[in-house]
């Protein structure tokens, strides 16, 4: 095992505490319902996610003194991008299939409702989710659990479950959680395959940008060109 892969025993408590924090922070900080249509909720979530990342990054890089590569923080090339596009195709197919069997949660905003929000907070939300959630659930949680248990697969399984449950406030504790759960599973498999965290961040941000920015824009633009109803 390479020196950077080993976790000295004095740092095992910090790894355990960090893993617990990565899993539990949404329930301790965000708690109940977060409405995407409430800008106060949006900015609070943005601040909470970056705060969680700063705390866990301090554990990873200052306390444990890991290198960024330990968490898959490195550049990516064309093969990585090709892998991401393949993963996106699989994800859209899986989500489309599951959507036929899961009811749409009533608290998920429609594209028209999202389009009514200012663009800037939506962009910040997308970038925050892509960067912060991937560091929390894919990079940090998987690798810290791998250091603690010796199994990256176990870390990946915990990551998928934690990522899905973290969306419970938006999707409810119902079959609808299969949607974020399946997205988390596919991004996790991409991470295990390519070991490239920025690639996962890009994929996550792309998915969120499509639903929060692109689709609302297209729906609104199409609506503005429809003929007016009535006489």
Image: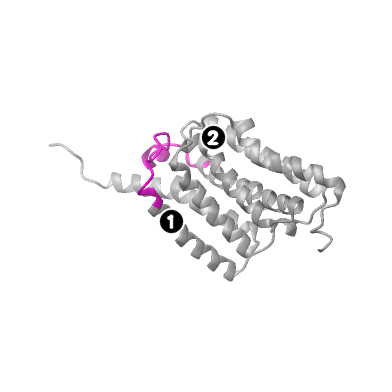
- Give x and y (percent) for residue 24: 65, 37
Among the two numbered marks 2 and 1 on one chain, the one whose residue lies closer to the N terminus: 2
* Nearest the eye: 230 or 88: 88
Q: Which mark is residue 158?
A: none
Q: Position of residue 25 (x, y in %)?
A: 65, 36
On the picture, is 69 further left or further right than 222? right
User: Horizontally, is 60 left or right of 158 in the view?
Assistant: right
**Which colour scheme appears in the figure?**
one colour
The extreme bottom residue here reads: 79
Numbered tag placed on residue 42 in the rendering: 2
* Disc 2 from disc 1: Cα separation: 28 Å
Disc 1 target residue:
94
Q: Is residue 60 magenta?
A: no
Q: Main secondary structure of the magenta part?
A: loop
Which quarter of the rendered picture does the N terminus lie within? bottom right
Q: Residues within 10 Å of mark 1 (few under 14, many from 20)?
A: some
Q: What residue do we see at 21% from left, 45% from top?
A: 227
Count of labels shown? 2
Q: Nearer the viewer, mark 2 or mark 1?
A: 1
When the figure is inspected, residue 73 is found, relative to residue 27, above or below; the finding is below
Is label 1 in a helix, a strand or a loop?
helix
- Mark 2 touching mark 1, by CB under 8 A? no
User: Measured from the top left, where is residue 128 in percent x and y?
Assistant: 59, 44
Using residue 230 as the reference point, say whether residue 88 is left or right of it: right
* In front of the other: 5 or 199: 5
- Farthest residue toward the left? 231
- Which x, y percent locates residue 116? 41, 37
Numbered range of the magenta stretch: 98-120
Looking at the image, which residue is at 41% across and 40% down? 115
Quarter of the image that includes the C terminus: top left
Name the residue located 69 percent from the left edge and 43 percent from the top edge. 53
Identify the secondary structure beneath mark 2: helix
């Amino acid at each position: 095992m390479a020196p950077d892969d080993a976790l000295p025993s004095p740092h095992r408590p910090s790894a355990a505490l960090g893993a617990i924090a990565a899993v539990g922070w949404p329930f301790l900080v965000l708690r109940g319902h977060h409405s995407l249509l409430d800008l106060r909720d949006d900015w609070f979530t943005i601040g909470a996610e970056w705060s969680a990342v700063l705390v866990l990054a301090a554990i990873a890089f200052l306390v444990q003194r890991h290198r960024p590569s330990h968490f898959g923080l490195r550049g990516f090339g064309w093969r990585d991008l090709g892998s991401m596009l393949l993963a996106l195709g699989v994800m859209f197919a899986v989500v489309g299939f599951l959507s036929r069997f899961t009811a749409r949660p009533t608290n998920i905003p429609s594209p028209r409702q999202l389009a009514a929000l200012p663009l800037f907070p939506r962009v910040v939300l997308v970038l925050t989710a892509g960067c912060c959630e991937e560091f929390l659930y894919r990079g940090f949680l998987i690798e810290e659990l791998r250091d603690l248990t010796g199994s990256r697969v176990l870390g990946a399984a915990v990551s998928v479950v934690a990522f899905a449950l973290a969306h419970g406030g938006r999707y409810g504790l119902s079959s609808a959680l299969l949607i974020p759960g399946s997205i988390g599973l596919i991004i996790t498999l991409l991470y295990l395959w390519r070991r490239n965290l920025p690639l996962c961040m890009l994929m996550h941000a792309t998915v969120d940008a499509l639903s929060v920015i692109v689709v609302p824009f297209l729906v609104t633009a199409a609506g503005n060109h429809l003929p007016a109803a009535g006489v």
